[in-house]
Image: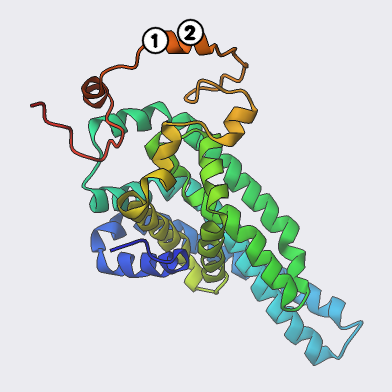
Amino acid sequence: MSLHTPYTYPFRGILYLIRHPPLWRHIFCGLIIMLLASIVTSVLLFVFIFPLQAYAFEKYMADWLAWLISFFVTLFEIGVSILVISSLFLACYMDIIFDSVWKQETMGLNEGETHRRSATTYTCIKSFLILVLFRVILLVITSPLNLIPIIGTILYIYINGYYYAWSLHCRYFDLLGLSFLQGRHFVEENRNDYTQFGIVGVLLEMIPFLNLITPITNVIGSALWACDIERFKEPMQHPRSYLLSPTPDLIEQGQVDYGSIKNEKEPYSMASASSVPPPPYQDVMDNNNLYPSAPPLEKQ
């Protein structure tokens, strides 16, 4: 077994939801709310915006062509509106869905991870809300790109896909105990992978009616991806490695206490460092479990 190609995980999320009925109860109420909001949005756009756009287009083209173009533009506007609604929906339901998949695939969390999760919940919520709000603003700003045939739509999907995939893994970084800067650095180091995942995720969310369920399946896909990273990622490329050593961004900012927001530069003395002998290997292994998901070491 190995890591799958990132762009396949949104599709794996769809299959996973179909094959695991216990997940349905977690998303049933949220899906009803999302469905009602999508229906109301679609009706309002078709009743008020669709004819106004058609009348505006009639000034520049034939009537039948104006109404046809207005119809497709309205469909696109509905897709964008549902994307915005789904972003707000994910802010409320992402943790529930992600944790359910994580527990099923990794057999739950040990005590150390549970403690770390509760200690960093506020940081993760803040980070995720920043990304969600940024994505909503980005959606609004980049929406006019779709007026440019083909190339504009490609740029729209590419720009939004990267940040979308990043936002879906905020929960994963929270479970590992990474700070916002550490999580950002890991995403930047794997930008191509997150872009692949995000492009497919955004494409699925732009398909009318299917986008009622794809915001949920994309979260499931991101959780499956995180579980595979835990199993198959090389140790030096694993996001947990950022807990053991600073990232270049943190070094540039002079942050020496990597678990806090301390940024003051502190002097480093080679003499003082060399005067303190390293602890015995066995003591380090007994007191620091570098990979909390692994079973504890048995003392001889």
> Mark 1: which amino acid?
Val
Q: Position of residue 228 (x, y in %)?
A: 34, 56
Give the colour scheme shown: rainbow
Query: Which SS class for mark 2?
Result: helix
Q: Position of residue 178 (x, y in %)?
A: 45, 35
Q: Quadrant of the N terminus?
A: bottom left
Q: Position of residue 28 (x, y in %)?
A: 35, 58
- Residue at coordinates 53% horizontally, 57% vertically from top-left? 194
**In the image, 120: left or right of 268?**
left
**Which quadrant of the figure has residue 139?**
bottom right
Mark seen at residue 276: 1
**Which quadrant of the figure has residue 175?**
top left
- Residue at coordinates 50% horizontally, 33% vertically from top-left? 179
Query: Which SS class for mark 1?
Result: loop
**CA–CA distance in space, label 2 to label 1:** 7 Å
Residue 6 lies, with reference to residue 71, above or below; the image says above
Name the residue beneath numbered marker 2.
272
**In the image, 251: left or right of 24?**
right
| Res 75 seen here | yes
> Which residue is nearer to you in this view: 299 or 199?
299
| Res 46 seen here | no
